[in-house]
Amino acid sequence: MQYLGYIVLSLLILLLMVLIHEAGHYTVAKIFGFTVDEFSVGFGPKIFSKRRKNGEMFSLRMLPLGGYCAFLGEDEETEEDKQKAKESKRCKRNASDCDINIDVSTEQQTEENNKIIADKKSDASKNDKPEQEDLLSFVMRAKTEEKDGGIDKVASERRADEEKPVRLDKDGNPAKTFNQQKPYKRILVLLGGVVFNFLSAIIFSLIYIWSVGYSAPLITEIYRDDAGAPYNAEIEVGDIILSVDGNDVSVMNSFTELAADIDADREITIEVLRGGRKIEIRAAKKSINAIDDDGKPYTYIGFGFLSQNEFIGNNAGNAFKYCVPYTFKLSWSILGSFGELLTGRVPITSVSGPIGSINTMAQLSIANWRNILILLPLLASNLAIFNLLPFPALDGARIVFTVIEWIRGKPLNRKVEGMIHFVGMVVLLLFVLIVDILSFVL
């Protein structure tokens, strides 16, 4: 039962990360006046939805493994795009046509359409009979559909069209679609989710350091040589190591990291907390003879002691001092992990999908409540970096397409781009499904 509770907690944490990401898109979009169609938590069938007066819909869906912020006309071609495509086809058919008016603007096309409509109305007014015949045909057709039971379908479709909210901007004009917005604005909206994840990672790091602090080695056992003398005589049981050669042990530098670059037999200064007082001692790395948990002897290079983690430094000063650099350290380590995965240094079986991640989070949370707080900035940074990858369907790839459009002065084929993102989404879903299966099987 306890494990189930931590599974639910892990799922809620994952949803929180997604919610923060999509809230970033939403907030930046509202700043620049974008029109939002739907803000959804989860995928699949709707459990609950509510439409605001401005036409925005907020939804809760059945599969709590993601979410999205959908914008008006996000995957549609603009009228300008369609017009340019028509002009391009016409130019290919007859190159001489391109010498004049090669880029008809949307306003010019609208004026031409209005002129055509006006001409049709003028023709209809000259002769009422065709109009009467059209009206009679409409009535007869409606009666036929009513007999066949088709009128209900037609009427319901018309009602649906009428009930569909017409999206207007703040000036009361038809709202611009996502693709009608300027490229730099779209890029900033796409970056909004990543920025919010990074900001939340900094806040979560602040909470973690303030609440938990950082771990320092607490000496629990001293190793002795064959003559019974300790390898480093000044180290005592109960000492808490605070710094190594002037470098503080902190969330940025663990004792293991600080000691890794120290050469063997080189004597260093270690600051320890002993009996409530800070004192400096001298120690050196040596060849240590020890016995493992199975009772087998082994040799290693170290300082000749065993330790356990002691959490210290949980105060506001350390929290504000280290929260930003600690977040960047986490992000850098995540980038390194992606690099090792791409180069094959880390096997794909070490990667977890959503289900595997939730299971791992639950197990870590059961082991120690502090792990919950350390997971928050780690997951937030992970989600930000992952979405920056230029893989189809992710924000990084959408930014790349928008930059290309900005440079070219016109977009790539929207349908082709949409298909690329769709295939990318399918590949991602299959990938996380496979790695989840492998994580449980292997």
Image: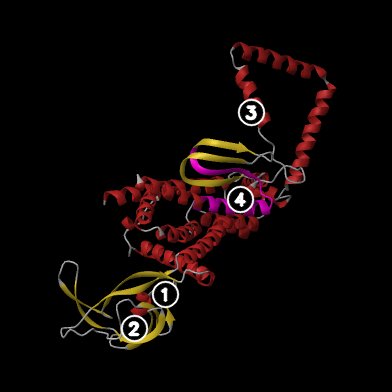
Disc 3 secondary structure class: helix
Q: Which of marks 2 and 3 is in front?
A: 2
Crowd around label 2: few <14 · some 14–19 · many ≥20 (10 Å) = some
Name the residue rendered at 37%, 70% in the picture. Answer: 310
- Residue 43 rendering spot, x and y as whole percentages: 49, 41
Q: Quadrant of the N terminus?
A: top left
Sequence-wise first label, 2 or 3:
3
Q: Residue furthest top?
A: 147
Q: Nearer the viewer, residue 422 or 213?
A: 213
- Disc 1 marks a residue whose amino acid type is Asn
- Disc 3 marks a residue whose amino acid type is Ala
Spatial CA distance of label 3 from label 1 is 61 Å
Sequence-wise first label, 4 or 3:
4
Residue bearing mark 1: 253
Q: Which of marks 1 and 4 is in front?
A: 1
- Disc 4 marks a residue whose amino acid type is Tyr
Name the residue rendered at 16%, 86% in the picture. Answer: 227
Mark linked to residue 26: 4
Sequence-wise first label, 1 or 2:
1
Residue bearing mark 2: 262
Spatial CA distance of label 1 from label 4 is 37 Å
Q: Give the range drawn in magenta.
A: 17-44
Sequence-wise first label, 1 or 4:
4
Residue bearing mark 3: 160
Sequence-wise first label, 4 or 2:
4
